[in-house]
Image: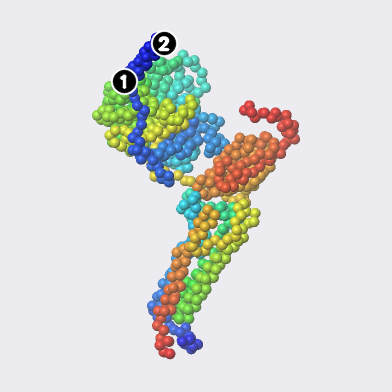
Amino acid sequence: MRTNKKFVWCALAIGVAALMTASAYSGCARRPKIQRGDTAQAAIATYVAPGDLDESYLFYSGGQSGEVFVAGIPSMRHIITIGVFTPYPATGYGYDKESKAMLGGYTWGDVHHPALSQTNGDYDSRWLFVNDNANNRIARIDLRDFKTKEIYGPIPNVSGNHGSTFVTPNTEYILSATRFSVPLPKGTYAPIEQYATTYKGVVSGVAVDPKTGHMSMGWQILMPPFDFDLGSGGKGPSDGWAFWSCYNSERATGKLEVTSAQKDRDYIAAVNWKAAEQAMKNGKYQTIGGTKVIVPKDTPGVVFLMPCSKSPHGVDVTPDGKYIVGSGKLQSITTVFNIGKVQDAIQNKKFTGDEDGIPVLNYDAIKDAEVNVGLGPLHTQFDDKGYAYTSLFVESAVAKWKLGTWEVVDKIPIAYNIGHLCIPGSDTVHPTGKYLLALNKLSHGRHISVGPTQPEDTQLIDISGDKMKLLYDAFTEPEPHYAQVIRVDRLKPIEVYTKEDNKDPNAIWDVKDAGVARTGKNVVVKMVAVRSSFTPTSFEVNQGDHVIIYLTNIEQTTNESHGFGLVDYDINVLVDPGETRTIELTANKPGVFAYYCTKFCSALHQEMQGYMLVRPSAGAKAALLRTPLSAGIGR
Amino acid sequence: MPMTSEASRRFFDLNLSTRSRIAVLIAALMLIPTYLLPLWNMTLYSNQFPDGLRLDIYTYKLAGNKTPARDDLREINTLNHYIGMRPLLEGDFAEFVWIPLVIGFFLVFALRTVVIGKMSNLVDNAVLFLYFGLFSLWSFYNRLYAYGHNLDPTAPVKVPSFTPTLFGSKQLANFTVYSLPGPASYFMVAFFVLLVAAILLTPKTVRAAT
């Protein structure tokens, strides 16, 4: 008994001592606190009262969702999602004839870097371009109706279109580059051992028609098999130049996390795109993969390499176009290059070597500063007061530093592991200085728990004062990379399509014009949707008929969209007010199939329905009987 | 004292004073805006439409407010179909043909009065116009009555027959409907008032003589 009592006392004493030590330790150790903003201040700064509007549009890239998310600043409320490279059933995108054709059979894309179109270096409120890193495409969203209007690609010879869609100051070109070099032309086999010599990258300028926005190949340049990463268009003194960072100048294969991180410096490729235009005009190109490609060793003066600290990620041109800022993610410095010095080095041939005939500029001759920003610097954005802000992935922070003095003046922790950051207008000649968005890769449970698959955390930071202040956490579906922001008053979207807007030759505006016409095995249904009915309310076809439904929503009121879901036929289309959509199907299943309005439109929305009756062809009844009931389950 | 037929004959034979003629001329000018401005306005407010669905009735056309985001006439017709009301179609209104003609007639009539300068013309003008105004109001009321009483019996939403309000406001399902005269109506009232003023502006020397 006594020993037992002694033991208990002993244990208690040890426990108390341990607790005291632990609390003392935690008291003096620099354990970071959970990041919070000043609640009242942040609430007032971000609260948008019911009935009030946000100040700006935020266009986030949706990463592997293949979509673009639209939110409001400062509320950070997600408002809509725009289907781009992926079918998006919510808006019927990818189910009607036009959008299906645009998707070209692909079911996903990897949207990384949205770019608003620019005129004279400012956003011109016309289009938003986004890249597809996976299937080498670029899409154009029209800001008049927030819809994807064109998908260009797969872009010839490009593999992993990551360094895209940054634009030149008058949207002459959208940048595009190879991240994963492959043997060219596409379809060529070469063993991995030949990577350094046979595999090739390309960098391109995709031309944009200034009137229609239509995209086509402008120029393309054959590059060594480096992994081209991010891009930036020059402006002002650097107008006419395009820049791409790259890692793996080692031309390594295998585990790149090791093999491509051996050299102390990789490169930023500087392309003189005016010279590239000239080379194209002068016929100085080879045809590879059906596309005209400039080969630098045969056409000097088009591309140069600027050494940049280890495995650079972001490359960003300052709003005045004077500096090119690159960050080596494996060093703690951000390097600032001076375009004047770059041009001087080119003029005076201050080269230290070449890569496949591309001159490598003398690092010391072109750099203005190495800024000691912190661990894992990725991207840099700029405000209107001459400050630069660099995201620090490893450190989970943003460093604010002064252009010219190269001094770090402030740092704010973020949650967690920031990738891109975005200051509205930073990539134009007129940046703003009110907000910074930290597009963080990991949220580590800062939200209510939703299981293992977690959202991203985009944080809104106030940069109007000397000290950066955290305002808001917005949890976003995977996965925003970069973002673009434009003031609400700069866009004037339409909300209904008028008769004049609707250019579809098969549009009808009166229920009297609705009807069914047959030519052989082709059945054309001209259908009207208006509260709360479809006209015709039913139509008959024969099994095997090719059916085209031109569906016009004749509403002329905001938000009165109608959906068209065809039961058992996997068809789902949304038709906005005044819009016509084409639904194409082969009536291969006999029977009676309901179509109904999928978007709640009115008090009698449920009643908005009809039937497609498919008369079985002679042999089909038997075939139907033979079909096991569970046929659909395994799909 | 009742006017004798002789006195009334003299009154109608009176030559209009210059001031009267000017008043009639101004009155004639008052009719010009009636070709440009709405005669009557109906606005339907509801929670969904805090800015109101707006319908303007002109002497010659029916015009719903049209913005890039909404066509109010189309919307009103879409909503009315639920209660089985016939769509408002411009072609259904003979008024849009005859009212502008009649107003044109009054304009010419007024100018004729200015030139001829006889009291009889002026009085005819005023009396006929008063009749025209009252007839138009009655006709308009009848129209409203017909729209509200000839509801399709198969309509999805059954409402008791009603007459949409001609003047003032009325609650109709989730809508508060305001119906008020538009600027053209005020110009027409001004026309009439000026004609009456013109009558008063000619000295009644005939009375002094008796």
Looking at the picture, tell me which residue is in the foreground, A400 or A586: A400
Q: Position of residue A579 (x, y in %)?
A: 54, 45
Question: Pointer 2: what residue?
Answer: A1
Give above or below for A432 relative to B107.
above
Q: Position of residue A85 (x, y in %)?
A: 50, 32
- Comparing marks 1 and 2, which lies closer to the viewer? 2
Residue A250 placement: quadrant: top left
Give above or below for A208 relative to B136.
above
Gap between marks 1 and 2 measured at Cα:
35 Å
The residue positioned 43% from the left and 87% from the top of the image is B206
Looking at the picture, tell me which residue is in the foreground, B168 or A203: B168
Is residue A511 visible to us here? yes
Say which element carries label 2.
loop
Amino acid identity at mark 2: Met
Q: Position of residue A515 (x, y in %)?
A: 64, 47
Which numbered disc flags the more N-terminal residue, 1 or 2?
2
Q: Chain of mark 2?
A: A
How crowded pointer 1 is (Cα within 10 Å; few <14, some 14-19, many 20+) is rated as few
Is residue A287 visible to us here? no
Give above or below for A276 relative to B3.
above
- Marks 1 and 2 in Cβ contact (< 8 Å): no
Question: Pointer 1: what residue?
Answer: A24
The residue positioned 45% from the left and 44% from the top of the image is A493
Q: Position of residue A387 (x, y in %)?
A: 29, 32
Side (left or right) of A16 relative to B183: left
